[in-house]
Amino acid sequence: KKLVEESSERRRLYNEVIELKGNIRVFCRCRPLNESEIANGSASVVNFESLPDNELQIIGSDSSRKQFKFDHVFRPEDNQEAVFAQTKPIVTSVLDGFNVCIFAYGQTGTGKTFTMEGTREHRGVNYRTLEELFRLTEERNGITKYELCVSMLEVYNEKIRDLLAENSSQPAKKLEIKQAADGTQEVPGLVEAQVNGTEDVWEMLKTGNRVRSVGSTCANELSSRSHCLLRVTVVGESLINGQRTRSHLWLVDLAGSERVGKTEAEGERLKESQFINKSLSALGDVISALASKSAHIPYRNSKLTHILQSSLGGDCKTLMFVQVSPSSADLGETLCSLNFATRVRGIESGPARKQV
Ligand code: ADP
């Protein structure tokens, strides 16, 4: 009984916070200057000094300062743990029956994969989330019985590929989005692998990444031009009243947002970049329509937003990480990403505050 009370109290407090802040959050994360940027003498164009932990300033080549404000700003020295501490309340709400979408957006090389996937030594949001979900389901053992399944798919040139369906010697099959009887979007045939612990998850991510790189001459190149979606399905059954919930958590590593120069982009590359632009702007349009409580939400403009339709909007939770580089060489792309995220969030970015 005590556990039930605790659980409903937690849920009540969580909903109160969400009501105050809304269902859409944008976090900014700035990576450190890397070795070659330091060796080249590249200066950081990002300033955090004397700013609160949700603001940053971009210093232009003419020393002008443009200030941006988000729900939180992670600085180069913030580690994976600090990032997850802020993300945890959002991802774990999937256990209470909420649908959740987390995106990493930004130019290639700014740390999208580092934030979501991370490395063995510096594990990212995906792994930490699953770890926390397993811990919580264990803790709630006796109140609710949970089952966790994971799917992994890729959207490349508006085509969906199941990354868990095939073994690495065959190309993965293509999938379509269908509307289920209850009006939600489903991808029939998508593999849902039941996972019982973090080791299962780690193995599956490895399989998915292997399939993802098949057929590409350079895995890194391809992964920066496709969206990678990890879907965690949580089925909960209350052992007290038998009530069942089914919810999805989507963890999305988006394709690189950089614009390709007109001269570089020809043939395949041009087609790819058009598909990427189209889907990233469709995502921006959907989130900003949701943030401004618009009557029409344009989900159907891309495969990405269409698949996520049932998990974006309503009382679903959305979090976008806008990833940026501190290097002066990336200034143009950094401003583009910050402007995109500002538009998405519907927050005004004002002129720089006076320095004291
Ligand atoms: P993206 O997915 O946006 O293309 P990556 O995640 O591959 O970028 O990051 C590019 C490189 O920068 C990788 O070597 C990654 O380990 C490193 N990196 C990114 N963010 C950080 C960070 N916050 N701290 C340390 N290294 C980082």
Image: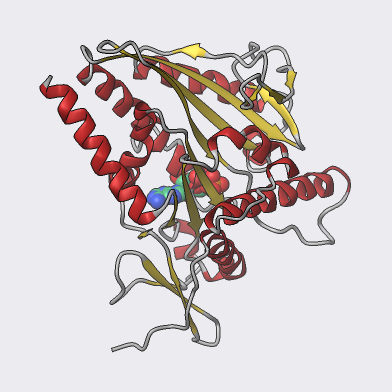
At 61% from the left and 70% from the top, the residue drawn is: 332
At 70% from the left and 46% from the top, the residue drawn is: 279
Q: In this view, does 24 lie to the left or right of 298?
A: left
| Residue 254 seen in the current view | yes
Q: In which quarter of the image is the C terminus?
A: bottom left
At 76% from the left and 36% from the top, the residue drawn is: 158
Q: Is residue 295 left or right of residue 251?
A: right
Q: Is residue 296 left or right of residue 74?
A: right
Residue 342's x, y, as percent? 53, 65
Q: Nearer the viewer, residue 16 or 134?
A: 16
Colour theme:
secondary structure
Q: Nearer the viewer, residue 8 or 26?
A: 8
Placement of 38 over or under 181, stated as above or below: below
* Quarter-of-image position of residue 173: top right
Residue 238's x, y, as percent? 31, 14
Q: Which of 244 and 65 is in front in this view?
A: 244
Q: Which of 239 and 127 is in front in this view?
A: 239
Q: Quadrant of the N terminus?
A: top left
Residue 278's x, y, as percent? 74, 50
| Residue 124 seen in the current view | no
Placement of 11 over or under 44, stated as above or below: above
The total of numbered circles placed on residues is: 0
Residue 194's x, y, as percent? 45, 11
At 38% from the left and 59% from the top, the residue drawn is: 71
| Residue at the far right in the pictured view | 267
